[in-house]
Image (spheres, grey):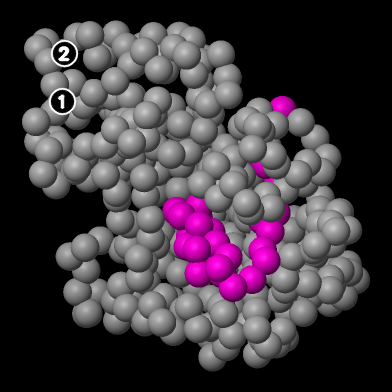
């Protein structure tokens, strides 16, 4: 057991008791969950940060938006505003948060809204002149004041919730028993070399309940796109070996991305910031200093889509434009059962019915 777990264990016990009591009050109906007259899909996790939730929300957007009118509702973590806000094409991360901005930037016609009070947020969305057919709730698994019909929980392959403990000793937001409320469990960031035996062992450890579907996904990186000019690209497989890279990240778990870059680039230096970090002029100056310290040419700066959102629309954008800065897109793909997952989501939206009502 690590020193951190030993020092914070008493606080973790107290936090676990509080969150478990809260969940029991909802399970026993002493606290009420509000049902709403719209399809709702919640995408969340038991742990804080780093599970790859954002690209999974984007996957849902991609399979639904051509056939259904959808909206995204997020709390807008670390935004500088409060209350309900409907994103526009001029919104910044300060207005709505980096993840909602990413959804809106990549899907300009999509309704993206933020409200820490999800019940109020849904109410506002349903007052739109053309309300959506389905609302995807980003990071709302613990927001039990709203009765979400279809609940998706994501856990990272190399950091399964089974092996974690409560905050602040670990990263769990609630006890492991909370997974019972999930209808779909996704194990994300599955390594490429994972075997069928490895998969079976994880399934055996997780012991999904009869009503639960279990899927495995892996990360798929795209070609690098210029921050200032997205049409300027670098193909990772064919061209990245020519470059030396300074990468900077402010995400929950940058390790898979850095491992990926090191596999193809000749040299990678990494500057790591806290998750959802608000970048400063000094931060960008530090990145430039690292870049200038590399002798010779063929050197670039790389960051994530989410980090790029916190640069756009700010005073830092013009400074960032002076760097040879590229953004590394990320998607998720399923190890198998892709059609089964897609059918589950689409059939739910089409039929307005879902098979699991135990925790409704």
Q: Nearer the viewer, residue 101 or 270?
A: 101
Say which residue label 2 marks: 294
How would you rate the neighbour count of disc 1 (Cα within 10 Å): few for under 14, some for 14-19, many for 20 or more?
Answer: many
Kindly report the distance in space between the C-alpha atoms of the residues bearing marks 2 and 1. Answer: 8 Å
Q: Secondary structure at mark 2?
A: loop
Residue at 63% x, 53% y is 110
Q: Secondary structure at mark 1?
A: strand
Residue 321 x, y percent position in the rendering: 40, 17
In which quarter of the view is residue 99 placed? top right
Q: Earlier in the sequence, mark 2 or mark 1?
A: 1
Q: Nearer the viewer, residue 183 or 48?
A: 183
Say which residue label 1 marks: 244
In which quarter of the view is residue 198 placed? bottom left
Residue at 36% x, 45% y is 329
Q: Is residue 351 above or below residue 291?
A: below
What segment carries the magenta color? 51-80
Q: Nearer the viewer, residue 159 or 84?
A: 84
Q: Is residue 303 above or below residue 140?
A: above
């Amino acid at each position: 057991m690590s020193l951190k777990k030993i020092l914070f264990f008493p606080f973790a016990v107290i936090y676990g008791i509080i969150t478990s009591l809260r969940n029991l009050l909802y399970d026993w109906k002493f606290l009420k969950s509000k049902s709403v007259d719209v399809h709702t899909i919640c995408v969340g996790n038991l742990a804080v940060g780093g599970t790859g939730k954002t690209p999974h929300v984007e996957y849902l957007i991609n399979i639904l938006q051509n056939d259904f009118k959808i909206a995204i509702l997020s709390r807008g973590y670390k935004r500088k505003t409060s209350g309900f806000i409907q994103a526009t094409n001029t919104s910044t991360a300060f207005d709505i948060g980096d993840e909602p901005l990413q959804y809106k930037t990549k899907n300009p016609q999509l309704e993206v809204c933020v409200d820490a009070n999800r019940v109020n947020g849904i109410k506002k969305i349903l007052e739109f002149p053309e309300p959506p057919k389905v609302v995807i709730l980003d990071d709302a698994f613990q927001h039990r004041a709203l009765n979400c019909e279809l609940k998706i929980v994501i856990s990272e392959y190399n950091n399964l919730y089974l092996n974690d403990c409560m905050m602040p000793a670990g990263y769990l937001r609630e006890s492991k028993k909370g997974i019972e409320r999930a209808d779909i469990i996704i194990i994300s960031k599955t390594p490429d070399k994972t075997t069928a035996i490895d998969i079976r062992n994880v399934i055996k450890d997780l012991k999904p309940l009869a009503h639960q579907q279990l899927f495995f996904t892996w990360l798929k990186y795209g070609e690098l796109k210029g921050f200032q000019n997205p049409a300027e690209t670098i193909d990772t497989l064919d061209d990245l070996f020519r470059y030396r890279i300074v990468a900077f990240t402010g995400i929950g778990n940058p390790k898979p991305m850095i491992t990926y870059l090191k596999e193809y680039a000749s040299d990678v230096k990494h500057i790591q910031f806290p998750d959802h970090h608000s970048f400063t002029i000094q931060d960008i100056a530090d990145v430039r200093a690292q870049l200038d310290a590399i002798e010779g040419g063929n050197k670039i700066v790389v960051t994530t889509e989410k980090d790029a959102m916190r640069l756009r629309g700010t005073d830092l954008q013009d400074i960032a434009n002076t760097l040879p800065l590229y953004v590394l897109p990320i998607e998720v793909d399923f190890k198998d059962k892709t059609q089964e997952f897609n059918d589950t989501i689409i059939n739910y939206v089409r039929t307005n019915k879902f098979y699991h009502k135990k925790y409704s």
